[in-house]
């Protein structure tokens, strides 16, 4: 027994705060919060799209995220003491993002100047596939690309982003997208 | 400057996730997520307001939160086992909300059927006061009432919500708002 709570089914505690929960409960909440962010963002998008069309929704989304991703990059790099100007720093920044649990990503650092990210589980893409309107062309191929690029350039403007695989997926392919981050050596 | 929660200045770790972070760090992360959620929501509101005007933004905001609050309640029920049909469950939900860290509030559980919650610090209200356009009438009065009603009725359709004190504030030392949740079992 740790003395910490695994849930909050017991009596009401006037002085309750999250420090009273055990690690397992805190991890569960963090995962849920990752998902909460995805839902918050997605619900806003869909609500605006239904009322004013996709162009308005995408325009708002793109404007928000181009600013917001820099706030995220700054706060994550400070929270985790992520420094450096190489690809390793970019992968760390993306790994430690508040969206960590919303997507299942694999990180492969070939060397400090080259790495890839492979996403095998993306609820956003699955929802877009179900919707069937090809919006992935904007969300994945344009917006996600721009956001990966902004994070890479936050670390080092010389980092080049190349999409190795993008939606649409072929049948049986479990890879949602794959990206390469690379610093080209100057000849 | 954001507080350091985990020192990830060393080598890239392909298997990094929150499980590697200390308990204190996990609690700190919840605080950060809280701010992140508030900022993301606020950015969506302002972005839609810039493009389509405040009435549209408010309509979208209401729709978004009428849906999201249910998700928040289900997460509290499923992850932290917060159940019941009384004001105790509502008091607990306030305490564990992803927004918990952003506000200072006194939770006064007078009995299992009677709860009074007083917000003494609210960054959303402070931002609206600075903006000076009177939007707090919609956000704090109309929208909060809808959200609190959803929360109350999720646990017990007979629970009544009454605003005891609402903005505008008389001055910087005044409370932000005060709400009562009550069930009259005899009725």
Image: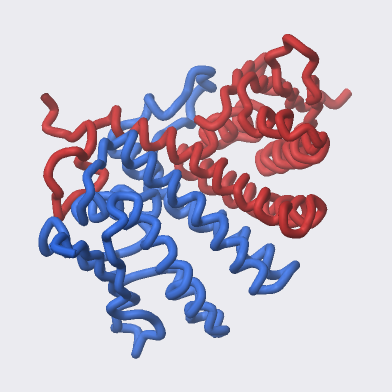
Chain colours: A red, B blue
Q: Give the image quarter of residue A89.
A: top right
- A103 left or right, relative to A138: left
Return the x and y of residue A82 as percentages of the image width and height: 52, 36
Image coordinates of residue A13 in percent, x first then y, are: 14, 50
Q: Residue at x 67, y 43 (%)?
A: A154
Q: Is residue B1 visible?
A: no
Q: Quadrant of the N terminus of chain A?
A: top left
Tell me what residue is drawn at x 35 percent, y 44 percent: B28
Q: Which image quarter: residue B135? A: bottom right
Q: Nearer the viewer, residue B53 or A67?
A: B53
Q: Residue at x 37, y 37 (%)?
A: A29
Q: Percent position (x, y) of residue A24? A: 29, 27
Nearer to us in this view, A45 or B83: B83
Task: Tell which residue pokes out farthest to the bottom in this image.
Answer: B170
Q: Quadrant of the C terminus of chain A?
A: top right
The answer to whether B177 is drawn above or below residue B114 in the figure is below
Give the quarter of the image for residue B57: bottom right
Q: Is residue B185 above or below residue A164?
A: below
Residue B171 lies left or right of residue A121; in this view the side is: left
Asked if one can make out residue B41 in the rendered structure from this viewpoint, the answer is yes
Q: Position of residue A80 (x, y in %)?
A: 46, 37
Closer to the camera in the image, B20 or A25: A25
Numbered circles on residues, count: 0
Up-down relation of residue A45 to residue B77 (above or below): below
Please, is residue B98 above or below residue B169 in the view?
Answer: above
């Amino acid at each position: 027994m740790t003395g910490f709570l695994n849930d909050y089914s017991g009596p009401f505690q006037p002085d309750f705060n999250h420090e009273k929960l055990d690690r397992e409960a805190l991890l569960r909440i963090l995962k849920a919060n990752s998902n909460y962010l995805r839902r918050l963002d997605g619900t806003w998008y869909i609500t605006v799209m239904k009322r004013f069309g996709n162009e308005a929704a995408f325009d708002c989304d793109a404007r928000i995220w181009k600013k917001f991703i820099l706030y995220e990059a700054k706060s994550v790099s400070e929270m985790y003491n992520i420094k450096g100007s190489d690809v390793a720093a970019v992968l760390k920044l993306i790994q430690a993002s508040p969206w960590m649990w919303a997507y299942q990503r694999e990180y492969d650092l070939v060397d400090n100047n080259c790495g890839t990210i492979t996403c095998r589980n993306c609820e956003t893409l699955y929802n877009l596939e179900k919707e069937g309107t090809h919006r992935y062309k904007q969300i994945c191929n344009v917006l996600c690309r721009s956001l990966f690029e902004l994070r890479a350039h936050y670390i080092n403007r010389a980092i080049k982003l190349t999409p190795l695989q993008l939606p649409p997926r072929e049948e049986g392919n479990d890879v949602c997208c794959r990206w390469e981050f690379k610093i080209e050596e100057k000849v | 400057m954001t507080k350091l929660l985990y020192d990830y200045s060393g080598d890239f770790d392909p298997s990094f996730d929150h499980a590697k972070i200390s308990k204190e760090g996990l609690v700190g992360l919840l605080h950060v997520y809280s701010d992140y959620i508030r900022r993301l929501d606020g950015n969506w509101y302002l972005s839609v307001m810039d493009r389509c005007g405040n009435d549209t933004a408010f309509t979208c905001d209401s729709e978004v939160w009428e849906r999201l609050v249910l998700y928040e309640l289900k997460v509290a029920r499923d992850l932290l086992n917060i159940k019941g049909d009384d004001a105790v469950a509502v008091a607990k939900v306030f305490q564990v909300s992803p927004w918990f860290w952003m506000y200072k509030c006194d939770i006064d559980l007078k009995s299992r059927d009677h709860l009074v919650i007083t917000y003494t610090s609210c960054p959303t209200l402070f931002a609206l006061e600075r903006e000076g356009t009177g939007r707090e009438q919609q956000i704090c009065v109309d929208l909060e009432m809808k959200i609190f009603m959803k929360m109350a009725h999720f646990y017990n359709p007979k629970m009544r919500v009454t605003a005891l004190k609402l903005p505008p504030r008389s001055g910087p030392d005044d409370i932000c708002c005060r709400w009562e949740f009550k069930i009259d079992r005899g009725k």
